[in-house]
Each structure stands twice: as C-alpha cells, then as structure tokens.
Amino acid sequence: MDTAYGSAPLPVWERPEPQPRAAPVPLSRAKIAATAIRLADDHGLDGLSVRKIAKALGVGPMRLYDYVANKSELLDLMVDAVYAEIAEADQPAEWRATVLAIVHRTRAAALDHEWFADLLGARPRLGPHALAVGEATAAALSQAPGVRGIDDLQRALSVLSAFLTGALRAEVTERRTARSTGTDVTAWQTSLGPYLTRMLDTGRYPTVARLVVEGAHLDAEETFHHNLTTVLDGITRDPRR
C-alpha cells in the first residue's frame, strides 16, 4: 500500500483494527496478543505459531492475518503488552527511584514471561508502551548527575540496557536449566564437588578457590539490585573527578 513512508506497509501500531464482522468469536489485536502470551508463557516461543493461537481462540488461522501480517508483528504486539505491565505504575519524582522502579518491574515481567528476556535487545521496540517506558527511563537518566548532554545520555542508556539484558537472560537461563535437568544449583554443585575439589587442590586457581570456599550462594533479587545500583553509581559519576 502507498503510505507516507513510500510503498512500505504501515506499522501494526498505526493500522486500524479490521472492521467487526458477524462471527461467533470476535477478535482484536489485544485479544490475539493476550492469547499468544499465555501460550508462550506455557510453552516458550518455540511452541508458538499462528495455527496454535487460532486454535486457542477457536477461529481459523487465516482470520489472524487480518490483524497481524506475520509472526514478527505478533511478537511486537506481545512485547508491547508486557511493556504495558512495566509502564502501568506511577513513576516516582526522583530520577534514581524512577530508574530503579522501571528496571525492577522489567525484571518481574521477565520472570513472569520468560520469553520476554529472549527478545530484550534483539531490536528496537517501538510500540506505544515500549516507547513510554523508554521515555520515562531516558527522562529520568537525563536528570542524573554526570549526564550532561545527549552523548552522556546515550551511553548511560546503552550501559543500563546491556546490564538489564545480560542479567535477565542469565537468570532466566538458570531457571530453565534447573527445570529441564531437574537439578538446582546446590545439587549441581554437589555432583561436581569431588572433581572441583581435585582441581582446586592443584593450587593453580587460588582466586577461584576463594570464591568456591568462602563465597555464599547469593540471593538473585538482592544481587540484581546491588549490581543495578553499582551500574547507576558508575553512570552518574563525573568522569572528570
């Protein structure tokens, strides 16, 4: 179709919903996204398909293509629905409290919808709720000490995004591994304990030995918060001091 952008189709966010039709099952993009999210929560993204979503909705697969052109658009809708959960709360007035609240809500959303972590950082998210979260985060960081211009703000956002993506993917991967193997961290450490003891007894890995012997298994939420505040401290430090 001809649009203001040339011959490219309008983004899904700007296309009007199809006109309601006399059908046993009414549809909307929000309903399709909600159903897709439930399936992805239960079976992951690998278990998601238009056919399965249509079956769960009780409609033929071709009806869904009136609302989404392809799976990529479907994922965009799903991701933006999760960002709506992240954006729904009122933001604190102080910049640091705002960033902490947004990032912790993002972690909570990723633990509720593990597939969401797989899509973080994959490409820019341009849905209205994703943009709202991005605006709130950028506006808060722009008020931080040490962020003196657009270059500083871009770097701060990049560092925060890298931390968030890496931390959430690591935490979600650990949870998935524990489920798929039936082995938690303690059981895994116990099974490899004799081997690791023999290796550390060689004396070649003294710092690793300290971490194993003296280090405790840290609480995931507490560690996430500690590392997040460390990142924010680094972002806001004046590099000229």
Image: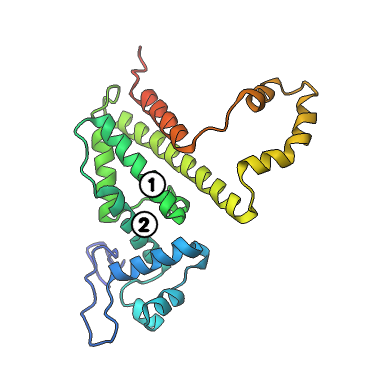
Q: Nearer the viewer, mark 2 or mark 1?
A: 1
Give the residue number, with chain letter if any, for mark 2. 79
- Please provide percent x and percent y for residue 96: 28, 30
**Dot 2 alpha-carbon crowd within 10 angstroms: few under 14, some 14 to 19, many 20 or more:** many
Q: Give the quadrant of the C terminus.
A: top left
In the image, 21 versus 190, the foreground residue is 190
Q: Residue at x 56, y 52 (%)?
A: 176
Query: Does residue 142 show up?
Result: no
- Please provide percent x and percent y for residue 53: 41, 74
- Please provide percent x and percent y for residue 144: 27, 26
In the rendered view, tell whether residue 42 sits above or below residue 102. below
Amino acid type indicated by mark 1: Ala
In the rendered view, tell whether residue 189 sits above or below residue 143. below
Query: Does residue 202 show up?
Result: yes
Q: Residue at x 64, y 49 (%)?
A: 183
Residue 209, quarter of the rendered image? top right
Say whether disc 2 or disc 1 marks the residue closer to the N-terminus: 2
Q: Give the quadrant of the N terminus.
A: bottom left
Q: In the figure, is residue 166 to the left or right of 161?
A: right
Residue 69, quarter of the rendered image? bottom left
In the image, 124 versus 233, the foreground residue is 233
- Please provide percent x and percent y for residue 120: 43, 49
Q: Which mark is residue 108?
A: 1
In the image, 211 versus 31, the foreground residue is 211
In the image, 164 versus 180, the foreground residue is 180
**Dot 1 alpha-carbon crowd within 10 angstroms: few under 14, some 14 to 19, many 20 or more:** some
Q: Secondary structure at mark 1?
A: helix
Task: Tell me if label 2 and label 1 are in contact, CB under 8 Å.
Answer: no
Amino acid type indicated by mark 2: Val
